[in-house]
Image (tube, rainbow, N blue to C red):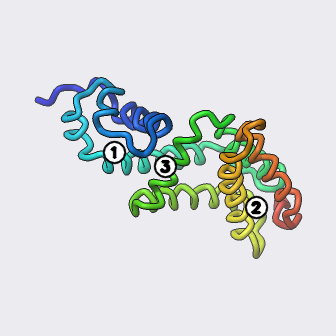
Amino acid sequence: MPRPKTISDEDILSAALTLLGTVGIGFTLSDLSRSVGLSRATLIQRFGDREAILRRMAEFEVAATRDWIGSIPVETGGPGLWRFLEEIVSSMGGGDGFSARVQIAALESRDPVMRACADERYRMVQDAIEARLADAPERRQAAEHLHGIIAGATMQWVVSDGSVGLSDYVLERLRWAFDRIDPVLLSDQ
């Protein structure tokens, strides 16, 4: 009979995410082993290699994103869309630990499984934005554009002077674009 798990897979994946933010892409299974208090062999037995852990992190994030977005009520029209945008951007916080996101983006650019997970997460966000827009011909393009502003502004924040927190920085750039969206797209049908 197998021994019960003393540390959940989610806790291990969370520790791996923390290591990405502190140690960087080069973290090892030995680093993770020390961090969670399990042997390297146990990690290999449960997950396989380091790349498998990174891929599981990406898959776990897809599921978490799906659950989280699904929990947010769909309110169409300008005010409902803005509330949704504020909610997703505010979840980024002030930027503490954002370096882990940058590390993950680098990994996603090189690994096809992780890239597919990132694409799925991005589509979920774009679909959620689109669901809050009025049914109009440019609806999808507007959703993709707003999401692109969020993604681009986060990268701009990385190289900013840091005087403004991440969420505030992104919302400021998003607001400018939001205020210029065709009012037809922001009607509440």
Residue lying at the far bottom in this picture: please name it.
137
Relative side of 180 to 42, left or right: right
Instruction: Give neighbour class at mark 1: few <14, some 14-19, many 20+ (Cα, 10 Å).
Output: many
SS of the residue at dot 1?
A: helix
Q: Which quadrant does the N terminus fall into?
A: top left
Question: Which amino acid is tagged 1?
Answer: Ile
Instruction: Report the Cα–Cα distance between label 1 and label 2.
Output: 37 Å
Residue 173 lies, with reference to residue 19, above or below; the image says below
State if disc 3 and disc 1 touch (CB < 8 Å).
no
Q: Residue 116 occupies which quadrant of the picture?
A: bottom left
In the rendered structure, find residue 104 and report the number of the disc placed on it: 3
Question: Which amino acid is tagged 3?
Answer: Ile
State if disc 2 and disc 3 touch (CB < 8 Å).
no
Q: Position of residue 51 (x, y in %)?
A: 32, 50
Query: 77 and 171: which one is in front?
Result: 171
Residue 58 lies, with reference to residue 95, above or below; the image says below
Residue 10 lies, with reference to residue 147, above or below; the image says above
Q: Which quadrant does the C terminus fall into?
A: bottom right
Q: Position of residue 160 (x, y in %)?
A: 73, 45
Identify the residue under disc 2. Answer: 133
Question: Which amino acid is tagged 2?
Answer: Leu
Identify the residue under disc 1. Answer: 53
Label 1 vs 3, first from the N-terminus: 1
